[in-house]
Amino acid sequence: MSYIWQNFFIKQVVDAMKEHEIIICLGSSCFMRGNRQTTEIIKSYLTKNKISAKVPFRGQLCSSLCSKGPIVIIDRHTYENVTKESIIKLLDETLMT
Ligand code: FES
């Protein structure tokens, strides 16, 4: 394999490792306890920071952690008791560092 292709593939692997992903629980408990508003805050945050295309954001059904909700998962880490007050700090810490 040539040096150029080797560097290309290494860059692809490194870039893949840097990618972020946000999953929000939209099960009825989390939704009613704040994730409805948190969804809008996250969408707005991604747009405002021009990272919507780089950070996939999706919902999922109940995460089976209702008593610890509202649940938001960022980069495969599950955050519990996420509120509309705490989500911005959480996004800053996880996406902007
Ligand atoms: S509704 Fe979110 S964990 Fe059950």
Image (cartoon, helix red, strand yellow):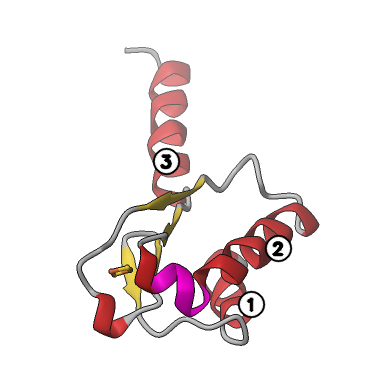
Would residue 12 be visible to someone looking at this image? yes
**Label 3 sits on residue:** 16
Amino acid residing under circle 2: Tyr
Amino acid residing under circle 1: Ile
* Image depth: mark 2 or mark 3 in front: 2
Question: What are the residue bounds of the magenta stretch?
Answer: 30-34
Q: Residue at x 46, y 24 (%)?
A: 8
**Label 1 sits on residue:** 88
Which is nearer the N-term, disc 1 or disc 2?
2
Find the distance from the CA under tag 2 to the CA under tag 3: 22 Å
In depth, the one of 37 and 74 nearer the eye is 37
Which is nearer the N-term, disc 1 or disc 3?
3
The answer to which image quadrant residue 23 occupies is bottom left
Find the distance from the CA under tag 1 to the CA under tag 2: 8 Å
Marks 1 and 2: CB-CB under 8 Å?
A: yes
**Label 2 sits on residue:** 45
In magenta stretch: residue 21: no
Q: Name the residue furthest right.
A: 48
Which is nearer the N-term, disc 2 or disc 3?
3
Disc on res. 20:
none
Would residue 97 be visible to someone looking at this image? no
